[in-house]
Image (cartoon, coloured by chain):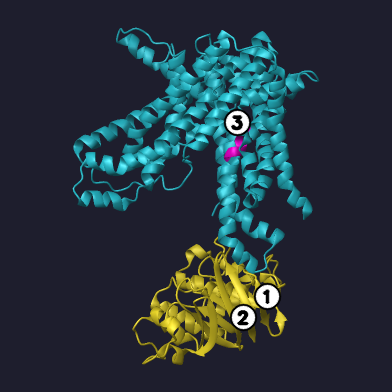
Chain colours: A cyan, B yellow
Amino acid sequence: MTGARALPWAAACAVALMVLGPLVVVMLTAEGSGALSARDWAAVRFTMTQAVLSALFSVALAVPVARALARRRFAGRRVLIMLLGAPFVLPVIVAVLGLLAVFGNAGLLNGLLAFLGLPQVSVYGLHGVVLAHVFFNLPLAVRLILQGWAEVPAERFRLAASLGMGPGPVFRHLEWPMLRAILPGALVIVFLICLTSFAVALTLGGGPRATTVELAIYQAFRFEFDLARAARLAVVQTGLTVAGAALALAVARPSGLGPGLDRAVRRWDGDRPAARLADGVWIAAAALFLLTPMAMIAAGGAAGLLALEGPVFSAAARSLGVALAAVVLAFLMAVPLAFGAVRYRALEGVGFLPVAASSLVLGAGLFLIVFPIADPGRVALPVTAAVNALMALPFVLRILLPALQGVEADYRRLATSLGMEGTAWLRLVVLPRLRAPVGFAAGLTAALAMGDLGVIALFADPGGATLPLQVFRLMGAYQMEAAQGAAFLLLILSLGLFWAFDRGGRGHA
Amino acid sequence: MLEFERCSLEQGSFRLEADMKIAAPGRVAVIGPSGGGKSTLLASVGGFLAPVAGRVIWDGRDLGPVPPGERPVTTLFQDQNLFPHLTVFQNVGLGLAPDLRLTNAARGAVEAALGRVGLQGYGARRPSELSGGQVSRVALARALVRARPVICMDEPFSALGPALKDEMLDLVAELLGEALVLMVSHDPEDALRFAPHCVVVAEGRAEGPFGTGALLSDPPESLKAYFGRRGWGTGAS
């Protein structure tokens, strides 16, 4: 019994050690390495600029889309809202390839422009990075705002209709107060996500004018092998992330994972033809923007799938191993923490420590630890699994902890009155009640780890790539067809893992 | 005999005093204004709230050190009496074995109890497939197999319609005649129908038992405001 009681604290220590250890090493290495260079400052400026722009565009575009989804009922609405959750488990490199197929040099858009005799556009640079970030975060912002709309009681819209309020007054009295409460949180969340952007900047940015701090860390390691500069940048990145996380904590945070999103509220103010038309256009435009790149990957990748070669398959096997190991590691940390946090709130805070450290910063710290004693390439896969488990930990806790608290609140008293304790309580109540959230959390972790293109790029040697890294290398070698085929395989494996875990959790009942 | 020996119960800043003896078996309604402490009193019997002073005693035995599951008590809560992911059979079976490792004799007892509450053949269903009245019957079947001498009911039928509620109260009276049944109710009609005796919980004190009919026709000061001007116990009973 005392052993079981010590487990949460042991897990908390392990998490703290794994997050704070690399941070301390990074800080010690950076000490006395000099002030930030002009290039470092440029990276900081670019990181801030793209994060602010990405947040503004994502949220501004999400408002009309969420409003349209909130007040329209149409065939495929549920599917569309479900697809809005997909970018969360979509590997970044796959999305980037899809975006390139639409907006790239040889993409649909430039084909259309050429047909019309207009000048070509390039997707590389600041606008490309922002475009990709909007692609990823527009759906998240829509979900957050949609939740706000779903939480406005239906009776209020009925009252507004009975008082004869048109769209203007309805906006002023019902919608604006809700938006004012929701939007700051949505902006900060997207900003925070984009602050740690690496893979998007790696593929669509680069060069002195479009390098994020995360990308600069990678370049300092891979191209310059300037460990002091890498450490200095890692300290800067940690400062940015911690400040962003503090900002997110200060602003009320919506979750985006809550229920009730598939409820369309009956509205009377949106019945006018102009409103119907506008809503239709917004929904169609958003669906087109989000679905076309995916369709392009599916179309191009299905053909490329047949032409895949050996290295892609061994990379896929490595990625599967990393994903499953990350799931096991994440749960080894999250389960004791969640059980402990039901009683001691402080343990929950420990589980959110990884938010303060980005993937590349942890990777940098671990590299500095490993480098003097071993070849980093040999530990690439375990490190990738561990860092991904840490990065997924806050999500896993956000899913498991409320579910566990709900089981405690709903059934502990009944179980106690029947004398159900210890293993009977775990086996007959906790496990069955937690199956669905456990499956969902495991699926999320597996998909995130499967598609991760971050810390692996720091560590992997040429023979040990994971599937996302292999896709990136094929892109770099301009083997676009092979890249698309491998990306399609990655897409299938990521979504398949997520689906299998999530489905397993829901059972057949 | 259930005895509250100079009991003080505290929940937050709320305090309830009880010093009384209730004879068993029998049916006793626990009445009083909402927020008066009716559920608090029952929680002390079920083992969910330890008295800060005094003792709760059953047949001469201090219940203080006895954990809830081992008390001579079955509690029927206001809601959440069943586990939704377990079948009806399993939910009743928990009354005999909290780890659900049931002997053949126990399985027979579960079937028999389901039969007595009128739910033969419902064993394989889950609570979500049952009506509100049937859910109550499953909880009742579990109380039957547990066969504990004290039953605490915290308005377990409050979500049912009047006719169904009366039916359930009659069923409880019929099936659990050997036990001491304490039933929290905010409806004096229920008390009159179900319980010959009642305990009054108001103004920080639990007192009784009183004869239900006599009390309702001539309520004490503490209950007058709660009952209003309506004359209870004048016709029915």
Q: Is residue A393 magenta?
A: yes
Residue at mark 2 to residue at mark 3: CA–CA distance: 55 Å
Whether label 2 touches label 1, CB < 8 Å: yes
Q: In this view, does B209 lie to the left or right of B159?
A: right
Tell me the subunit letter for badge 2: B
Q: Which mark is residue B150?
A: 2
Same chain under badges 2 and 3? The reply is: no
Location of residue A48 with respect to B193 vertically, above or below = above
Tell me the subunit letter for badge 3: A
Whether label 3 touches label 1, CB < 8 Å: no
Q: Which residue is drawn at 60% across and 46% down?
A: A438
Q: Say which residue label 1 marks.
A: B71
Q: Is residue A49 visible?
A: yes
Q: Which residue is drawn at 18% across and 48% down?
A: A164
Residue at mark 3 to residue at mark 1: CA–CA distance: 49 Å
Callout 1, which amino acid? Answer: Arg
State which region is magenta. A391-395
